[in-house]
Amino acid sequence: MLTLLIFGYAIRLEAKNIPIAIQDFSNTPLSRSYVERLFATNQFQPTPLIGQSRQAGLDRGTAKATIVIPTDFADKIKGAQPSSVQVLVDATDVNNARVIKNYIEATTRFFLRNSGLQSELPRLTLHTRIWFNPGRKESLYIVPGTCALILWVYPSLLSALAMVREKEQGTIVQVYASSLSATELIAGKALAYLLVGLSEAAIVISLSAILFQLWFAGDPTPFILGTPLYILTASMFGLMLGARANNQTAAVQGVALVGFLAALLLSGFIYPVSNIPFPLSLISTIVPARYYIIIIRDAFVRGTGWVGIWFPMLMLLILCLLLFDMTRRNLGRMQLPSD
């Protein structure tokens, strides 16, 4: 629950409240109207200049951009002459700098068009329609990914600790000495943690619906079938790590390094998978969270159903079977031979 609240409310990809400083040498009604239009977008917030230096705010980090309006700004525009406005952008964060540049360019075009100062009509007009998330609510993108991260980390962590604890306490020797096979042992433990994971899923999905207004956008059956399969895969991953680890510390580190970091960085949770460079892009193909994120985002945002997500479902099934086989082989070698 804490993970859902922290990630759901804290992670935001869209830049807002960007501090910018204005140096208006024109100080005319037209230049002040231009400045007001910039701040009316609610994307920027004003920050004072430090002295009269246009770069001091950028150097000290108090401003992400400085806009310098020349003294002849209004005269040139009213005389149908081009006027230059200087924009200095802090490009320490390249993506943020690109967003600031696009915001300022779009606002400037809107200001000229609404003020009747456009020198000529554009030859091409775009009419854009936003599908799936017309309100551009970031929670519809972040929260389903957070649910996928939660349902991967905690079931795998619990199952890994349960398996390795039996090895530390020596109780697993009784299992090895019994007639119980490795397949039966894995199936019993996986079923137990599947039930725990389904309880976690019910909690985080219910909270998401209440706090972030998450609801099904289309056919819910892929999500209903994909969620138990994904939790089962997470449990298999934890059992596999627990079967190979010798103590709880190693199991926790394995889940944290291999499971959590891969699910966080290589699944498309925050960054698009297409942006992952080679050869890490190859590793992302075996990260189960990558495929479940597609399933859960389709369920709550896109709503395309089986037509769009049959392949992620197939990949989850394949990865689940592979993890089961790896765990079975590892436990099979550890079991005592029976007569």
Image (spheres, grey):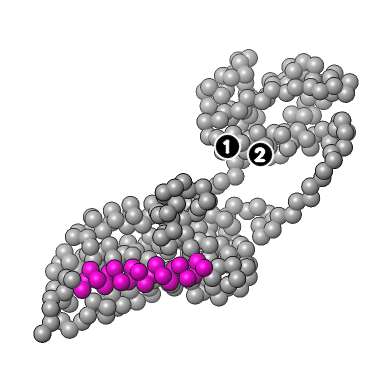
Give neighbour class at mark 2: few <14, some 14-19, many 20+ (Cα, 10 Å). some
Which quadrant is home to the C terminus? bottom left
In the displayed structure, would residue 250 be above or below residue 62? below
Nearer to me, 281 or 107: 281
Tell me the SS state at disc 2: loop
In the displayed structure, would residue 173 be above or below residue 148? below
Instruction: Check residue 322 for magenta coloring.
Output: yes
Residue 230 place in picture, x, y as percent? 43, 68
Residue 323 at least partly seen: yes
**Position of residue 279 in the picture relative to residue 300 (left or right):** left
Give the mark nearer the N terminus: 2 vs 1.
2
For marks 2 and 1, give the CA distance. Answer: 12 Å
At x 63%, y 35%, the residue is 100
**Position of residue 83 in the picture relative to residue 323 (left or right):** right
**Position of residue 2 in the picture relative to residue 101 (left or right):** left
Give the label on residue 43, or none.
Answer: 2
Instruction: Check residue 92 for magenta coloring.
Output: no
At x 48%, y 64%, the residue is 292
The answer to which image quadrant residue 175 occupies is bottom left
Tell me the SS state at disc 1: helix
The residue range painted magenta reads 311-332
Q: Amino acid at mark 1?
A: Asn
The answer to which image quadrant residue 75 occupies is top right
At x 57%, y 28%, the residue is 90
Residue with the mark numbered 1: 96
Nearer to me, 8 or 275: 275
Residue 22 place in picture, x, y as percent? 68, 24
At x 79%, y 50%, the residue is 127
Give the label on residue 18, or none.
Answer: none
For discs 2 and 1, the disc positioned in front in the rendered view: 1
